[in-house]
Image (cartoon, rainbow, N blue to C red):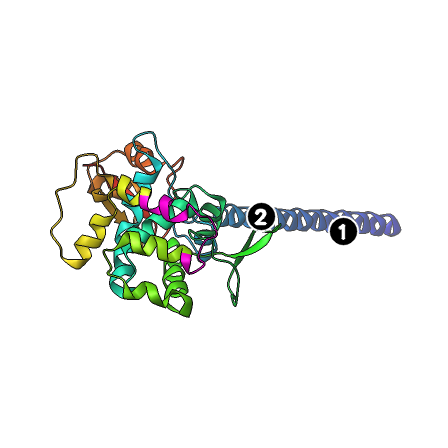
């Protein structure tokens, strides 16, 4: 009898131990499931798009595109005339010449080098350690400089002309002598196209680009016409700017801002110049 009781006690004890072990395994499983769920949540939060744009985002910042409201060259002038005047004050190169060359060589900002490399003057990679873009030109897949901002392309254009002795005679000309500059550029070897001077002069006279020279020199200029897009209001994107905040600041809808600047989304890059209003 005692033997039977012992066997029963052993079986009961074994069942109790098995039951405890089973509960312990269930608790462990729940803890693991919880940890796994927490990791998924963290990944989801990290995947949210950031409001800020880092340098890599801005490296591929596009040049402003054309819109249906204005000629692409007029938009180009509105966007870059202030930069051209700044370079004129710093380096004594007529703003009209800089703008005409930019329009001609970048296809009013629509060329591949301008869009993907912010390179408006076709400057190649000679003695260049920065980013590069490859493009068919005189030869297949030549190396061109790639800039973070378009203004850096204008900087290099000025440095190119001021640092080479073959262009020294240009700086003996008056800064409002755009015809002399246009002809002098080709004579110094800037372009091989015999019609290059005529093309520059035609652009300057068509869009009255010489008025920007007159403004820098302090000469009297005629009042711009209503179709003069280069006198449009522009805004340089700063940290914290959004399409929404700019729309409120300038009393425009986001859609109107997109249309003015040929944008298909609301992404902005630091240093980007937006057209805000037409006269």
Which residue is denoted by mark 2 in the rendering? 136
Where does the image place residue 24, in percent across and percent down from the top left? Answer: 67, 51
Quadrant of the rendering where the C terminus is positioned:
top left
**Residue 238 appearing in the image:** no
Q: Quadrant of residue 180?
A: bottom left
Which residue is denoted by mark 1 in the rendering? 13
Q: How many marks?
A: 2
Q: Quadrant of residue 167?
A: bottom left
Indicate whether residue 115 is drawn in magenta.
Answer: no
Identify which residue is drawn at 24% across, 62% down: 89
The disc, 2 or 1, on the residue closer to the chain's N-terminal end is 1
Please tell me which residue lies in front, 206 or 84: 206
Tell me which segment is drawn in magenta. 187-201
* Furthest residue toward top: 68
Crowding near the residue tagged with mark 2, few <14, some 14–19, many ≥20 C-alpha atoms within 10 Å: few
Q: CA distance from mark 2 to mark 1?
A: 86 Å
Please tell me which residue lies in front, 171 or 142: 171
């Amino acid at each position: 009898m005692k033997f039977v009781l012992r066997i029963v006690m052993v079986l009961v004890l074994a069942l109790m131990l098995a039951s405890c072990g089973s509960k312990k395994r269930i608790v462990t499983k729940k803890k693991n499931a919880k940890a796994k769920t927490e990791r998924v949540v963290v990944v989801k939060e990290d995947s949210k798009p950031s409001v800020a744009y880092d340098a890599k985002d801005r490296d591929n910042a596009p040049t402003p595109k054309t819109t249906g409201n204005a000629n692409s060259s007029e938009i180009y002038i509105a966007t870059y005339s202030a930069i051209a005047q700044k370079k004129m004050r710093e380096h004594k190169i007529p703003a009209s010449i800089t703008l005409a060359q930019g329009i001609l060589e970048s296809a009013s900002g629509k060329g591949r080098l301008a869009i993907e490399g912010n390179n408006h003057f076709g400057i190649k990679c000679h003695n260049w350690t920065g980013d590069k873009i490859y493009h068919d030109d005189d030869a297949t897949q030549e190396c061109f400089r790639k800039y973070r901002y378009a203004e850096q392309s204008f900087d290099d254009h000025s440095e190119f002309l001021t640092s080479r002795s073959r262009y020294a005679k240009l700086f003996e000309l008056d800064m409002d002598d755009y015809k002399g500059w246009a002809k002098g550029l080709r004579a110094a070897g800037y372009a091989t196209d015999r019609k290059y001077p005529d093309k520059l002069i035609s652009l300057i006279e068509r869009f009255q680009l010489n008025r920007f020279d007159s403004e820098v020199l302090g000469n009297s200029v005629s009042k711009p016409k209503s179709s003069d897009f280069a006198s449009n209001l522009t805004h340089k994107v700063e940290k914290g700017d959004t399409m929404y905040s700019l729309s409120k600041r300038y009393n425009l809808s986001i859609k109107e801002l997109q249309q003015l600047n040929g944008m298909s989304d609301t992404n902005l890059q630091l240093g980007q110049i937006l057209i805000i209003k037409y006269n």
